[in-house]
Amino acid sequence: MNIKAGIVGATGYTGVELIRLLGSHPHITIETVTSRSEAGKSVADIFPSLRGVINNQYVTPELDSLSTCDVVFFATPNGTAMESVPALVSTGTKIIDLSADFRLKDPVVWSKWYGMEHKCPELLVDAVYGLPEINRDKIANAKIVANPGCYPTAVQLGFFPLLKNQLVEPVSLIADVKSGVSGAGRKASIRHLYTEVSDAFAAYAADGHRHLPEIKQGLQTVASDEIGLVFVPHLVPMNRGIHATLYASLKDKKTDLQKVFEDYYQHEPFVDVLPCGSHPNTSSVRGNNIVRIACHKPQNGNTAVILVVEDNLVKGAAGQAIQNMNILLGLEETTGLMATASFP
Amino acid sequence: MNIKAGIVGATGYTGVELIRLLGSHPHITIETVTSRSEAGKSVADIFPSLRGVINNQYVTPELDSLSTCDVVFFATPNGTAMESVPALVSTGTKIIDLSADFRLKDPVVWSKWYGMEHKCPELLVDAVYGLPEINRDKIANAKIVANPGCYPTAVQLGFFPLLKNQLVEPVSLIADVKSGVSGAGRKASIRHLYTEVSDAFAAYAADGHRHLPEIKQGLQTVASDEIGLVFVPHLVPMNRGIHATLYASLKDKKTDLQKVFEDYYQHEPFVDVLPCGSHPNTSSVRGNNIVRIACHKPQNGNTAVILVVEDNLVKGAAGQAIQNMNILLGLEETTGLMATASFP
Amino acid sequence: MNIKAGIVGATGYTGVELIRLLGSHPHITIETVTSRSEAGKSVADIFPSLRGVINNQYVTPELDSLSTCDVVFFATPNGTAMESVPALVSTGTKIIDLSADFRLKDPVVWSKWYGMEHKCPELLVDAVYGLPEINRDKIANAKIVANPGCYPTAVQLGFFPLLKNQLVEPVSLIADVKSGVSGAGRKASIRHLYTEVSDAFAAYAADGHRHLPEIKQGLQTVASDEIGLVFVPHLVPMNRGIHATLYASLKDKKTDLQKVFEDYYQHEPFVDVLPCGSHPNTSSVRGNNIVRIACHKPQNGNTAVILVVEDNLVKGAAGQAIQNMNILLGLEETTGLMATASFP
Amino acid sequence: MNIKAGIVGATGYTGVELIRLLGSHPHITIETVTSRSEAGKSVADIFPSLRGVINNQYVTPELDSLSTCDVVFFATPNGTAMESVPALVSTGTKIIDLSADFRLKDPVVWSKWYGMEHKCPELLVDAVYGLPEINRDKIANAKIVANPGCYPTAVQLGFFPLLKNQLVEPVSLIADVKSGVSGAGRKASIRHLYTEVSDAFAAYAADGHRHLPEIKQGLQTVASDEIGLVFVPHLVPMNRGIHATLYASLKDKKTDLQKVFEDYYQHEPFVDVLPCGSHPNTSSVRGNNIVRIACHKPQNGNTAVILVVEDNLVKGAAGQAIQNMNILLGLEETTGLMATASFP
């Protein structure tokens, strides 16, 4: 099988990661790679790690060429995909959007958090939220997959088993989450200079981060009562990786968290529940599509503490996008995604 | 004024930091620096950053020479100070212990967490917990100051204003805390190799860390009801710095957190309450004795989120020890501790 | 084809990297993984990045089980392989030794640098130095492949085109080389703690490093006159990567270095000569088997400056070992080694 | 004594470091801090590490207010100081320029490397190159001090003893130099993002860096014959620090390098010659004004290898500027500059 893929906006870390991972996929040909700013330049000239991997030059995005692709990934800033997706999806090309444009169901909420009008609110209903562990069947039939954000992937996968089984008070959720710097993207800024970030640690957006409504929307779908969530993101001086430390009040102290998580994820190829007492390290998922989770109940009290790690560029972005593509195209879900994490 | 100081066990990062900071103190002479393992070697040969700063050689610790000092700092592993403090304190020398030996009031609790019998439980009553912001008067008259742990300093200073003013449910406390690697000390281990720690993030001791009883003991002294605390420490790939992200349920959503904190700390020389909406960065206290705090109430809900940063080797160890020494000896509390943080 | 491989001493970073890379090799089954210290434990328990990749437990190394393997990799400390290789090689099992035991031809020189007697000097003649770019044919017929050191791989590949074509004064060679910390291995030590290495840079072993005789031996084989080499290694606060900055006096200022290097390496699958004016970054080879090289002639003077990067754990160790294995077993040389570098 | 100082362009790391160091200087009041882009904002709002240290707001630079200062530091981008220095110097205010505007004596060479016309070439004659170890007397009487670049400080201090004593071939000099990222300044750029720099190492400007003519000009003043220098800078993933590895051909192999360096620098307060066999680490000078040097003669050959470390923001910029100010104003040269390096 030979599937033609396009990548729109491939000058950021997510786009480069898509190219890296697709390079190991046996059924994909990267047909077109677009960038308005770098059109005419060779992809590998800008990203030397891709020398010998891809010969494409960046081209300006055009409907004609994109519509010859079986699937098009949007690795664009928020607000870009919604401009061209309506025309492209009507040609039958499948869309996997790694930006936030199709993640929220309510265009009013979307506008509030993203600061602009949504250009195609009518497509929000059909877009499928691409978290396979909760939405696998819908993804298989989607035209547009809204690939989840990096924080929402980790936080939702950590809370789902607790909420679905009604084991915790839905109003008591706290997500203290830490991210590597690649989550901030590849754009000129003082705030993410090496000198500002290294040997330093801080929270940001404690009063409200754009991923908050996305997480709440997802958790609400499995919860019996209204969700209450405090979400505080932090920046860690590391390239890749997200570590979510999740807190929730157990309804019953005696809940066997380990069994709950092992049962819930027993058939999932990319969720690894660690043995009791473990502390997953982001370095154990560096470069691969796996989420590792460990459960704790400190001092046998009534607080569940769930630790979740993922690579924000893989399961939190490009890897999950390829997982979604595999589902969408009827391939084995793990195709091209089985490389071992790189340590150290 | 010329004060003679001794440092016992100065081959770790805390000992080196004491020497660095005392080098800027106008009234101190470092009389003796001990180490059993390095006796006979020059301090500056082992720590080249101290070349030109200190000419001492390490000597084996002896009561005779230590008792000629006005004050002796113990920068030893847990379980060491309690061996020699009883004899030394009886000579009139003041003791500032940077280890955990005199921090807990209950020797049974101490034994449980530190895995050995306490050698001088009778001294625990007299030892004063050296957190000046809460115990300044007692420190002034102490014979033994138990210098607080690095985590407990940050966590207690963040929760005190809330508990003292009875603004939060004492049973609802969560401390999600992140530390630089110098907190793990300077000893040969695989776990803290550069290759294990860098570009990586993980929690540890989620089921119970030795600083938990210390924090609970301290918070309990200001709380009206019994404290419930979940404390999860994490290791950050950075040298210095602690960032505590503290969560508590407000009794009244309308509480003006900013005012509470500004009022509570208005006279404290080493506690800096940042403006509303701030996110303190550990890099803003690198190398100095200041704690910076910011308050948040996300989505105007009923969860207070308090962000606290300190340098774990300074306010979390050696700087606080010198602050305690200044109080103990009747010096201006800030003497020798006013250097500006180093950024970047 | 199904090839049975054994790994002796797989508790270090090189062993883990072998397991990672062999996991992507279509023809290999890892039959046995040995460690005296960890025997009985699961490999994946000690290295969580390998969970789901390998089910083996460590076993103590035994001739009986190792001799059932087609090929055995030694990822042991120096001085270990020479103990068991004589017996093992006589069973017909092919040996690829990643330690230094079989790299030097002269056992007297070996003893001088490694501080012990060589146990099987008679095998040194037959052992083939496993640098495919210079020794491909001999490797194909070897019984024992001495896999090159990480520094020697980078330095030799950078100097070979100059020496082979007699373009520089052989007595004038300077190799100023910088290595990531994984090159120091995975053993408890103060010197390589995060706190000692991070935000820091220093040279080491400027008066003589064990890789010096290995590099000189290799360069001498292609040089017309006697080699003079100054080799200064440095430690960089990064996990992986070697950057060699090489200096040599050109016999003729007008030499077209770019053409020399492009011609010399035109058929090599793992050597990438960058365009004129480039500065290769270790991040462009993170995790893969490629060496990238750029040539400079500053101010059009008579000094050639050659910049070489590799991943010390891949082309500098485990990747090159697999490249050698492919050659030895008659497989396509690039099998299992084509993964794209991971950036960032 | 109360000296009024002004800082022009204090929104970069060099300006912040000046403020940090001047904060420990007993005789200085910072009168004015200028920035066109940040005028009206509080310095400490932009740099939280300076909270409590400085109350100034940024103002736009004006001759009237600057000329009330005894000394004005320019911490501006290249090409800015030369615009306002002519007017300011004529008011009698002493100038210490941390940019490159007054470092080169030849305006033609300056224009070639800095890409613009020099605005006051007539002042280049009077400007004194502010390397106290070679120019102390002239600095004492200067009106304009051209504070040296970070690389030139380390490289010149390493080569001076060899050249002055005519011990090496002046044509054979190689400077392989490695710098922390703060040397690149504080401006929005992709190239110096955390994600681009961390866990990575590369050379840059191998074909010619702006500090080359400055170094050659300085070395030439002490050399008997014409200098030949190859200078290759590299970027290290660390915040602060420069490590120069210097190579030169000895005229006589038997030269006692250790004695040469110890004699040459015996009276220098800020140059520390380490014992034989040492490898200075940038971490040993983190935050202070000291240069540490070690000499090697590998394999007793005829190549001198000199290792030099400094903190690029202190001895390589702000610290040296204050050292120059002390000399200029007749203060003890070490005033305010004796803080101990911070480790780790």
Image (spheres, coloured by chain):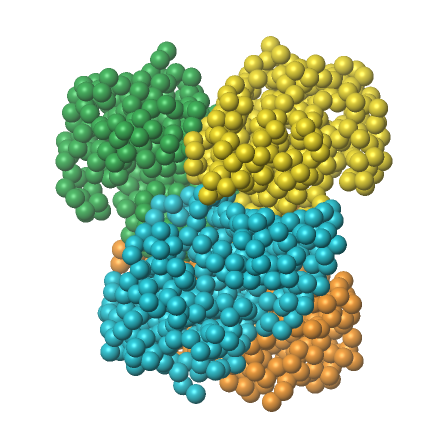
Chain colours: A cyan, B yellow, C orange, D green
Q: Indicate the position of residue B187 as horizontal and vertical percent values.
A: 68, 44
Q: Residue at x 31, y 60 (%)?
A: A118
Left/right of residue D39 with respect to residue C271 in the rendered view: left
User: Which residue is at the front of the view, C266 or A72?
Assistant: A72
Asked if residue C269 is positioned above or below residue D295 in the image, the reply reads below
At a point 75% along the width and 22% down the height, the residue shown is B127
Quadrant the N terminus of chain A occupies: bottom left
> Horizontal and vertical percent for residue C142?
60, 82
Do we see residue D336 in this rendering? no
**Viewer-nearest residue: B203 or A323:** A323
Query: Do we see residue A95 in this rendering?
Result: yes
Q: How many marks?
A: 0
- In the figure, residue C167 lies in which quadrant? bottom left
Residue C7 lies in quadrant: bottom right
- Image quadrant holding the C terminus of chain A, namely bottom right
Who's the residue at 61% across and 81% down the image?
A: C28
Query: Seen from this angle, which residue lies furthest bottom?
Result: C1
Q: Is residue B68 above or below residue C216?
A: above
